[in-house]
Image: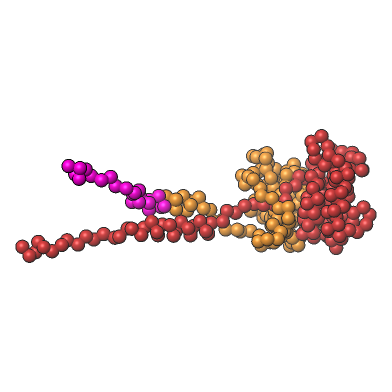
Chain colours: A orange, B red
């Protein structure tokens, strides 16, 4: 008889839904890097023309505050011996010739101090720099 | 028998709400994750040596003193005025073969000028549409 035919089950099985969600969850948990910002406390200046840097891979960081503390790639450099900067940067530049130096300088720092750092970078032939800034106005 | 009528209880945790729990966790991570992006103003420093002679007509000199006052064209100008002045100057100077404005904007600061002030001026110059920006070394004390 006709009634003996089994009816096909409509609807999608949701039994594996938790597995899919868990997979997504693990993906996000693994790819998320909780980066603790460590370093010298400083406030970067704000600018309207702030742009995002495309590649994080080719970055070297120089931090400097208004009291004369400088770190280059998380290594402390004494103010009395600024030539360490060009030494470290040149080593980095040898490994990667597309290096961009990100300058995170406190907004209260004096230009003379900034120029001294820039002169060191010029000595190391690292001419591509980036002044770390915040977006001016609206959030940020 | 009477004993056989007793139903066996199944000891299983109800897993129907598992998806909801996982969703909740997923949303938590989605919301709390902040992708830390490096941002700033890109700049190319002048290379050592090799001074190039440039027609003075194509250079706009900006001087910033220790107090942050801006000198342009031998007179003190306000920030908003500076952008307008530069914009007209860039239009007048025309473009080179690559389609970039010919005008070179030179920014010179005092050693005691605040970095914040320098960035503000640099921001204004970029806003005016200048692509060739030169940083002059401050005079040694």
Residue B93 as seen in the image, left or right of residue B116: right
Residue A11 is one of the magenta-drawn residues: yes
Q: Quadrant of residue B74?
A: bottom right
Residue A129, placed above or below residue B81:
above
Provide the residue span drawn in magenta. A1-22
The spot of residue A66 in percent (x, y) is: 74, 61
In the image shown, does A34 or A79 lie closer to the viewer?
A: A34
In the image shown, does A100 or A52 lie closer to the viewer?
A: A52
The spot of residue B39 in percent (x, y) is: 67, 52
Q: Quadrant of residue A6?
A: top left
Quadrant where the N terminus of chain A sits is top left
| Residue located at (85% from left, 45% from top) | B91
The spot of residue A126 in percent (x, y) is: 73, 43
Whether residue B127 can be seen here: yes
Residue A19 as seen in the image, left or right of residue B86: left
In the image shown, does A102 or A121 lie closer to the viewer?
A: A102
């Amino acid at each position: 008889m006709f009634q003996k035919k089994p009816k096909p089950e409509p609807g999608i099985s949701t039994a594996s839904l938790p597995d899919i969600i868990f997979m997504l969850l693990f993906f996000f948990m693994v790819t998320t890097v909780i980066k603790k910002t460590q370093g010298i406390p400083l406030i970067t200046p704000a600018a309207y023309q702030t742009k995002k840097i495309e590649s994080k891979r080719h970055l070297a960081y120089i931090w400097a505050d208004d009291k004369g503390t400088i770190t280059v790639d998380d290594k402390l450099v004494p103010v009395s011996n600024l030539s360490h900067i060009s030494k470290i940067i040149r080593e980095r530049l040898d490994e990667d010739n597309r290096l961009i130096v990100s300058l995170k300088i406190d907004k209260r720092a004096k230009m003379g101090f900034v120029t001294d750092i820039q002169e060191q970078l010029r000595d190391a032939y690292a001419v591509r720099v980036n002044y770390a800034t915040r977006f001016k106005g609206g959030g940020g | 028998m009477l004993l056989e009528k007793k139903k066996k209880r199944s000891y299983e945790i109800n897993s129907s709400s598992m998806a909801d729990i996982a969703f909740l966790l997923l949303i938590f991570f989605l919301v709390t994750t902040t992708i830390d992006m490096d941002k700033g103003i890109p700049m190319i420093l002048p290379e050592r040596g090799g001074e190039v002679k440039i027609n003075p007509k194509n250079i706009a000199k900006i001087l910033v003193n220790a107090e942050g006052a801006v000198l342009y064209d031998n007179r003190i100008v306000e920030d908003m005025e500076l952008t307008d002045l530069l914009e007209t100057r860039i239009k007048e100077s025309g473009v080179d073969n690559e389609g970039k404005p010919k005008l070179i904007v030179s920014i010179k600061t005092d050693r005691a000028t605040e970095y914040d002030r320098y960035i503000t001026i640099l921001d204004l110059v970029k806003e005016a549409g200048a692509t060739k920006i030169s940083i002059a070394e401050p005079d040694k004390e």
